[in-house]
Image (cartoon, rainbow, N blue to C red):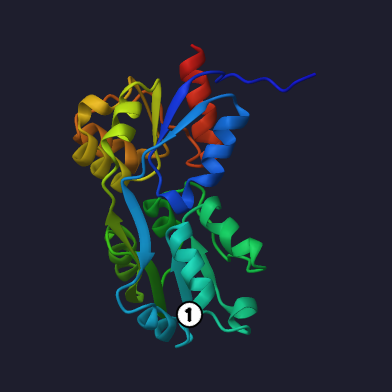
Amino acid sequence: MKPARPLAGRRVVVTRASEQAGDLVQRLQVLGAKPIEVPTIAIVDAADGGDALRDAVRGAPDWIVVTSANGAERVLDALTAEQRTTARIAVVGPMTASVLERAGVTPALIPPAFVAESLVDAFPSGPGSVVVAQGDRARSVVTDGLRAKGWDVAAVEAYRTVTVTPPPAVVAAAREGDAILFTSASTVTEYVSAAGSDAVPPVVVCIGPITAAAAVDAGLHVAAVPDEHTIPAMLAALVEVLGS
């Protein structure tokens, strides 16, 4: 028996950076959807090539905090072989954790809700030193929250998010889509800026509340936000909305 394909023939716009979209595209195809890739951002290394992150991580902080999969990849590059077994690393959620775990590094802390605010709530009180590896557009929730809990926090740029302008033909294809998936606030703002709100398909699904808030601020109606802020949960929400 062939597996169920609940999104058969549905055109779904994917706004993730090209280097990150592969898994999401494959999952959509398994569900029968026709993905339309419209990347409006790209993830690139920090301006200093990662020197500041490497120095900060190898300074033996009490904790390393990673707020995204992009940051996790670069933290792995910065860790020494010994630190991969000894460093205490806190992550914002399972997608970030999975990057570390595939490399044999086990996070010491994953909050119950996969947002920055929950990570701060779950984090122990200081004193001590914390390195926060984050993107250049990161919110200050983690750094401010940990400082308020008594930690000496070094916020280090691990990567940058840059704008990519999609070709007009790709935007035209997206305009005919049935749904669009947003996986970060930056994908929302950059997509609307580059393509226009008229190129947003009728069904908008966001991976989490921060992304959804950016969509609402951009004047979009959000059809669904999963309780668990992961790719599988977002796809399950998409299936539920399109199947209703």
Mark 1 closeness class: few <14, some 14–19, many ≥20 residues within 10 Å:
some
In this view, 78 is above or below 244:
below
Where's residue 25, x and y in %? Answer: 52, 38
Residue that numbered label 1 is attached to: 62
Of residue 98 and residue 198, the one placed in the foreground of this image is: 198
Where's residue 238, x and y in %? Answer: 48, 25
Given the image, on which type of amino acid does mark 1 rest?
Asp
In this view, 181 is above or below 92:
above
Residue 171, quarter of picture: top left
In this view, 223 is above or below 47:
above
- Residue positioned 58% across, 31% down in the render: 29
Counting the numbered discs, the total is 1
| Residue 226 as seen in the image, left or right of residue 199 | right
Where's residue 58, x and y in %? Answer: 48, 86
Q: Quadrant of the N terminus?
A: top right
Where's residue 30, x and y in %? Answer: 62, 30
Of residue 208 and residue 40, the one placed in the foreground of this image is: 40
Determine the residue located farthest toward the right in the rendered image. Answer: 1
Of residue 43 and residue 60, the one placed in the foreground of this image is: 43
- Residue positioned 58% across, 81% down in the render: 83
- Residue positioned 40% across, 80% down in the render: 129
Residue 218, quarter of picture: top left
Which secondary structure lies at badge 1? loop
Q: Is residue 124 visible?
A: no
Q: Is residue 168 visible?
A: yes
Determine the residue located farthest toward the top in the rendered image. Answer: 244
Residue 191, quarter of picture: top left
